[in-house]
Amino acid sequence: MMYFGIKVISPKVFLVTACILCSIVSLATGSSWSTAGSMGVALIGVGTALGFPVYMTAGAVVSGAYFGDKMSPLSDTTNLAPAMAGSQLFDHIKHMVYTTGVSLIIALVAYTVMGFMHSSSNEVDLTTLNDITAFIESASKISVLALLPPVFVIVAVVLKFPALPALLGGVFIGVPFMFWNKPYIEAVLNDGNGDHLINNIFNIMNNGITMGKIPEGASEVIQELGSLLSNEGMQHMFWTISIILCAMCFGGIVDCTGIMGTFASLLLKIAKGRGGLVLATEFSCIFVNAICCDQYLAIVLPGRMFKEAFEDMRLEPKNLSRCLEDSGTLTSNFFPWNTCGATMRQFLGVNSAYIPYAILNWVNPVVSIIFGYTGITMTKMSDEDYEKILEEREKEKAEALAALEA
C-alpha cells in the first residue's frame, strides 16, 4: 500500500485522500484500531515520503479512522451507544449523519487547504522518495497480489459477512503472503525443516518481525520507516490489554460507589435547558475518557447518568446516543493513558502533537453542542412515547420494591 501510494498519490490532495481512504476502510471493518494499524501505517510512510510531517498525516488518519468507526454498524461503540440510550442502531447511525457529516466536510476542507499550502511551500524530495521505494523493494516482493487480504476483508464486510469470520479470513489469507513477501523468511521455507518452519510462524505471530535490514548511513526517514514497519507481535499488545482491564475495574468502582452519580447530579444542577444538557453529557464523556481511561466506559457511564434527564426533557433516545458517540468515541484518543490514545500513538509512531490535526475528532463535539443549543435535528418524542417511558419506570420501581421485600 505504501509503495503504490507513493507512486500515485498527489501531494496536494494527500491529506484529503488519507482521510477518505481511512474512512472507507474503517466503515467497512468497523474498527479504528485495525484501520490505524494497517492503512494508517501505510499512509504515514507515504506522507513521510511526500514531505508531510508525521503528526499532520496522523491527524488525517485518525479523523478518517474514527469517522468510519463511528458510522459503521459493525463497530462496537456504534452498537453500545444506542443500547445504553435505548435507541435503535440504524436510527442512531442516521441521526449521527447530521453532526458527523458536517464535521467531516469541515475536516476535508481544512485538509484540502493544508495540502495545497504545504505542497506549494515544500517540494517533494525525489531522492528520499527513491530511497524509500528502493528500501521497500529490498525488504518485500512488490505485487498487487499482496493487496488480497485487505481487499478480501472489505469485500466480505460489504457483502454483509459476519465481522469475525471476515477478519479471520483476512488473517488466514495474509499468513502465506507474509512468508512469500519477505526474502529473509523465504529462506526458511526452502530449508526443508518443517519443525523449524512451524516454530518460526508462531514466533513471528508472538514476537513480531523486523522490516528488513537498515542500510548503513541510511537517512533518518529510512530509519523511521524501518521502525514503523517493524512490530513486536502479540506480546507487545498485552500492555494495552492490561490498561483495558485496569480501566474496567476502576470504572466499576467509580460507578458502584456512587462517585459518578454525585458528579452527574452536580452537572444536572448547572445544566440549564436542552443545550446545557447536551454540553453536560459531552463534558462527562470527555471527563470519563480522561479519568477511567477507556472509551467504553465513556459511553456506558454517561449513558446511564443522563438517560432519564433526556427522557424528562422529552428528547428521543437517539439524541443521547448521538451525544455519547460525538464526544465519548471521538475524544478517547486525545489522552495518552486512554486505551485508544495509547494505541493510536503506538501504531502511528507519534506523540500528542497530532491532536490539532485530528480535525474531525475535536470539531464534532463542538458541532454537536451547537446543534444542542440551536435545536437543529434534536428530535422530540411524542406524548405517547413519554407516557410509555413513565409506565416502564413505575414498573421497574415496583419490581425493585418487591425484590427488597422478598
Image (spheres, rainbow, N blue to C red):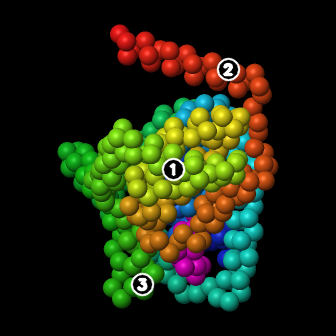
Distance of label 3 from label 2 (alpha carbons) = 64 Å
- 143 in relation to 29, above or below: below
Residue marked by disc 3: 220
Looking at the rendered structure, the kind of residue marked 3 is: Glu
Which dot marks residue 266?
1
Which dot marks residue 388?
2
The span picked out in magenta is 48-61
Distance of label 3 from label 1 (alpha carbons) = 52 Å
Front tag of 1 and 2: 1
Q: Within 10 angstroms of label 1, few (less than 14), some, or many (20 or more) residues?
A: few
Which dot marks residue 142?
none
Q: Position of residue 153 (x, y in %)?
A: 55, 43
Determine whether the residue tagged by mark 2 lies in a helix, strand or loop: helix
Q: Position of residue 54 (x, y in %)?
A: 52, 75
- Residue at 35%, 62% (x, y): give it: 231
Residue 79 seen anywhere in this rendered image of the structure: no
Q: Within 10 angstroms of label 2, few (less than 14), some, or many (20 or more) residues?
A: few
Dot 1 or dot 2, earlier in sequence: 1
Residue 61 seen anywhere in this rendered image of the structure: yes
Please tell me in which quadrant of the rendered image residue 117 appears: bottom right
